[in-house]
Amino acid sequence: MKKIPFFDYPALFRLYEAEFIEAFKNAGTRGAFIMQKDLEDFETTLAGYTGAKHAIGVADGTMALLIGLRSAGIGASDEVLVPSHTFVASAAAVRHAGATPVLVDCGEDHLMDAASAAKAITSRTRAIMPVQLNGRVANMDALCMLASEHGLKVIEDSCQALGAKFRERQAGRFGAAGAFSFYPSKTLGSFGDGGAIITDDDTIAENARMLRDHGRGKSGKVEAWGYNSRLDNIQAAILNVKFRYYDKEVARRRSIARQYHERLKDIKELRLPPPPDSDPDHYDIYQNYEIEAEDRNGLKAHLQDRGIGTIIQWGGYTIHQFEKLGLGGNVPYTERMTQRYLLLPMNVSVDDAAVAYIGDAIAEFYHRGNA
Ligand SMILES: *Cc1c(COP(=O)(O)O)cnc(C)c1O
């Protein structure tokens, strides 16, 4: 029997070990720990890669969202639309900015549904936070049109979608600001926490640089209540190494997605993510491969028996099901989905033989194969 963990953390280090050690030694020798050249280089690379005018490294993806919202002027008495199928961090950022998260349902693509968002708009709605989940960008034509009709700012949670595109435009580039996370299991993962904000807006960029560094402005004078939320220079140095391989790693993920699709497409008990290039409007980077499955729990247990690790994203809860947070929400699709969704192993340490093995094990569960 094979053993295929859902995610192989030690492999992150093994993959480019010599270069990481060199980067660490290099930064350490220079004593470059906080807001040094490696961070500046990383910000330049990230801005260049996404096409944004500014990139600002921060402590993590959640802080990128919070600082992004505050920098764009979102705060007390504002409502922000957030999809219900997301990490609690999306809503927490809204809450910590002083605003109120209002939950919106997702559609069959597992992304914010524009019709559901339209229904949730009130006189207090000030912004909309599409979450570009699983490495796919939502239909931003519909969401941006809704935002412009109602004068709403768009702050994207693009933490799972660095490099993903909708109509040639990258995730994080559709509104006032976009947020990225470099949590180790993200497509561009550091060796700890990390995050960044991108924006084309000079004022938002200046606010973000101030807020991440205790509210200190360029003159050194404190201009607002800020945070200690800088991206560590050492993490930036690690990310500079990983960025060199990023396109190659995304291509590998797309190849895995293509193989999953070929192997699973005829199993009618499953709903699969669209395969790469099936829709010319979308370029997906497959942060995750999230399927919907009949008898999801049975399938998960069966795969476990075959040595295959899977994950139910967010523990199988939509964020309105965390009663202590007090979030209401009419999100029927997301609620149904919590019984059906499952993440299959999707990362660069999954080889073709592993994809074949996983495909056979799934077919076997639904009595479609002889594995
Ligand atoms: C990872 C993630 C975040 C938060 O990122 P951290 O770096 O862990 O703070 C926010 N939203 C989504 C959708 C994420 O996947």
Image (cartoon, rainbow, N blue to C red):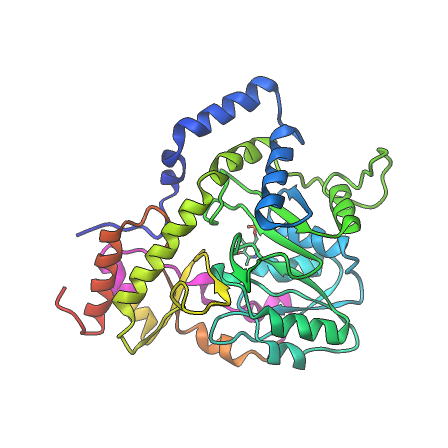
Quadrant in the rendering for residue 130:
bottom right
Can you tell which quarter of the image residue 10 is in?
top left
Question: Does 216 sit left or right of 270 as displayed?
Answer: right
Nearest the eye: 147 or 366: 147
User: What is the x, y in percent for residue 95?
Assistant: 70, 61
Q: Quadrant of ligand 1?
A: bottom right
- Furthest toward the left, the residue is 370
In this rendering, does residue 40 appear at all?
Answer: yes
Instruction: Give the quarter of the figure containing the C terminus.
Output: bottom left
Name which residue lies at 48% across and 49% down: 186
Residue 260 horizontal/vertical position (percent): 30, 62
Answer yes or no: is residue 103 visible: no
What residue occupies the far top of the structure in this picture? 29
- The range drawn in magenta is 300-328
Closest to the observer, 268 or 76: 268
Picture coordinates of residue 35 (x, y %)?
Answer: 67, 31
Image position of 328 (left or right of 365)? right
Q: Is-magenta flag for residue 224?
A: no
Picture coordinates of residue 180, whole percent (x, y): 58, 51
